Amino acid sequence: MPSAGALFCLSSAAAFGAMGIFGKLAYEEGATVGTLLAVRFVLAAALFWLFLVGSRGTRDLRALPRRDVGIALALGAVAYSAQAGGYFAALDASTPRWSRCSSTRSPRSSP
């Protein structure tokens, strides 16, 4: 039976893999990079705090040194949000590959 850590890792990988699909679907409905990131980060923060309170981990969080908490918040607010913004901007600028795959033309044969 897999451990909880392995299940979290597999769930994270599946969600990360599906992120591009859901991002494209959101763009088709008129979402922008800013709204997509805002919804994503608000939902993630809400789920994090629900998990933290539900597991009584707030005591452990308070035990962390302020410097470590500040570094973690800075990395999330600056570094990860910049990476995610770049990812979704690139996703918005790209064309969907699956539309080319459903073409009725046959692939060109090599000479």
Image (cartoon, helix red, strand yellow):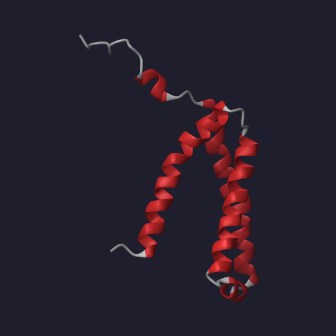
Residue drawn at (54%, 40%) of the image: 21
Where is residue 108? Give x, y as percent.
31, 12
Q: Quadrant of the N terminus?
A: bottom left
Tell me: 65 left or right of 108: right
Residue drawn at (73%, 38%) of the image: 32
Where is residue 38? Give x, y as percent.
75, 51
Q: Specify the farthest residue to the left.
A: 111
* Picture mark count: 0
Decide if residue 101 is in sight here.
yes
Out of 9 and 50, give the one closest to the viewer: 50
> Quadrant of the rendered structure where residue 72 is?
bottom right
Q: Quadrant of the C terminus?
A: top left
Decide if residue 75 is in sight here.
no
Tell me: 58 left or right of 109: right
Q: Is residue 86 above or below residue 107?
A: below
Out of 96 and 2, give the one closest to the viewer: 2
Where is residue 93? Give x, y as percent.
63, 31
> Quadrant of the rendered structure where residue 52 is?
bottom right
Residue drawn at (52%, 54%) of the image: 15
Where is residue 85? Give x, y as percent.
68, 46
Residue drawn at (41%, 17%) of the image: 103
